[in-house]
Amino acid sequence: MIKKVFNNQGIVVKTGQFNENGSVITFLTDQGLLSCYAKNINKPKSKLRNALGLLNIVNFEITQQENFKHPILTHASCEFSSTITNLETECLKLFIIEALNKLFLYDKFKYETLKQIVKSLNSKTDTTIIALYFIRNAYKYLGNNLSFNYCANCGDADIKNFRSFNVEFGGVICHSCQNKLKTNIINENYFKILNEIETNFDKVSFDSTLYRKYSYNLFDYLTSNLYDLFDIQQRDAFNFYKQILNLEKI
Ligand SMILES: [Zn+2]
């Protein structure tokens, strides 16, 4: 029997029960999606189960055998657990899983970008900033690379001239283009956040809690627009995450 062994690292993006004891696990890796069969994972004593939580970053080994459709998962160790310690971050995580699924983003999202987002879930970065960065990249991978730090209409990159933000016109709109396009004028704090997301997501330099209201509004606007575009009616995780944020009176 021909048997090949591979080692890899990936993020768990999907799990589905295959039979009584086993599940098919789908990883996003730097070579794209990879599904494998995890034997006995549904047994209570399974050592693999804890390592394979959704959005965990996992080092794994698979064995491809001749007559099986899926490679078999032979080893998995969790490099980074996305098991969350607070409700708000847990809700954001559920939203990310929902959006990846509903927007068919699994095979479009770049591994390194999703890894950066997952790792930030356990950092001090405000969840609204992470949510905004996630949805910004969702747009990008779906083919709409919105401008966050230059005018989408004329290319003006001076933040002092920014007046408006509009998905239909491609992102940020400057003062003179806003006059022509008649888009809504928004508060200048929005442009500070958009600029930070684009250039400095890893280490947002302002105190993000001060800007929470603005990052929340941008996230809500962008996600609602994208979900409408894809006609996604079921928005449980999106709504729940928003409710949690609203409880804290943004
Ligand atoms: Zn312009």
Image (spheres, grey):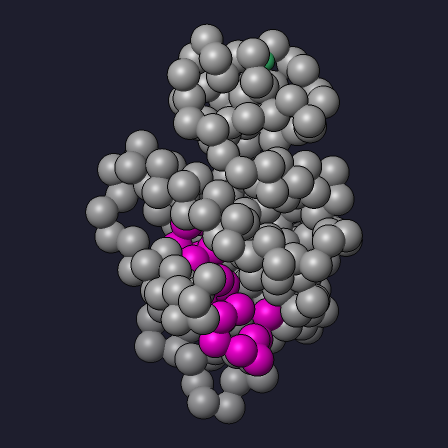
**Residue 110 percent across, percent down from the top left:** 62, 41
**Residue 135 percent across, percent down from the top left:** 50, 43
Q: Is residue 249 left or right of residue 174?
A: left
Residue 108 sits above or below residue 131 on the image: above
In the rendered image, the residue lying farthest to the left is: 233
| Prevalent SS, magenta region | helix
Report the residue at 35% width, 42% height from top: 224
In the rendered image, the residue lying farthest to the bottom is: 45
Does the magenta portion include 72? no
The picture quadrant where one finds residue 127 is bottom right
Report the residue at 72% width, 22% height from top: 158
Q: Is residue 53 left or right of residue 81?
A: left
The picture quadrant where one finds residue 212 is bottom right
**Residue 78 percent across, percent down from the top left:** 67, 72
Quadrant where the image shows the N terminus: bottom right
Does the magenta portion include 91? yes
**Residue 161 percent across, percent down from the top left:** 65, 22
Residue 23 sits above or below residue 232 on the image: below
Magenta region, residue range:
82-100
Residue 157 vs residue 83, the one in the foreground: 157
